[in-house]
Amino acid sequence: MFGDTVDFETAQLLAAFAVSILGAVFSWRFLIAMFRRAAVKRYLWQRGWEPIKVRWLIFAWWCPWIPVGPSVWVLATAFRVIYSDPNRLIHKAYCWVGYDVGVVVAPIFSGFSRRIEWVKDEIIGELPLPEVWVSDEVVIKKLKENSPTDNSPGQ
């Protein structure tokens, strides 16, 4: 019955339109996620922490509306963050970046401020100590300065 009422070209046009809408929505969400990823990195750098990995969790909870206390977030984006603090400890954390409903309703008054909500943060390790490279000339010179001249071997 469906084939009788709609011809094949119209079905192709509708399918192409649906795919283009889905592609546009995914591209829009991807761009928003990358801007919010940069906001998470900026947040870490401002506190003196060094981001190691910031990964977008695409399918972290299907619903983009996250209730946090009395407010509700709109289109929140989840990230898994691995960073190091000034004490050389490596942290693994999860966070949400989003806007309050009030921000979406009245963005002119809020200045498009983002909120970053840290869900979980745990220490998973420690950065290795940096390697120190010393040239042979410096080592030989220091050994000669520190060795006693009367007890040196070969004399």
Image: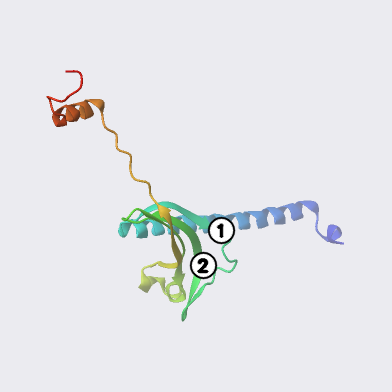
Tell me the residue that label 2 is attached to. 75
Q: Which element type, helix, strand or loop, lies under badge 2?
A: strand
Q: Earlier in the sequence, mark 1 or mark 2?
A: 1
In the depicted structure, whether residue 58 falls above or below residue 98: above
In the shown orientation, is residue 139 left or right of residue 11?
left
- Quadrant where the N terminus sits is bottom right
Residue situated in front as seen by the camera: 87 or 112: 87
The image shows residue 89 at horizontal and vertical percentages of 37, 55
In the depicted structure, whether residue 18 falls above or below residue 74: above
Quarter assignment of residue 36:
bottom left
Residue situated in front as seen by the camera: 124 or 32: 124
Residue situated in front as seen by the camera: 67 or 82: 82
Residue situated in front as seen by the camera: 92 or 40: 92
- Whether residue 147 is visible, yes or no, is yes
What distance separates the C-alpha of mark 1 from that of mark 2? Answer: 12 Å
In this rendering, the label closer to the viewer, 1 or 2: 1
- Whether residue 31 is visible, yes or no, is no
- Quadrant where the C terminus sits is top left
Q: Residue furthest bottom?
A: 70
Q: In percent of the image, x 58 and y 66: which residue is there?
A: 61
Residue 58, which numbered label?
1
The image shows residue 38 at horizontal and vertical percentages of 41, 55
In the depicted structure, whether residue 150 falls above or below residue 130: above
The image shows residue 104 at horizontal and vertical percentages of 45, 72
Amino acid beneath label 2:
Leu
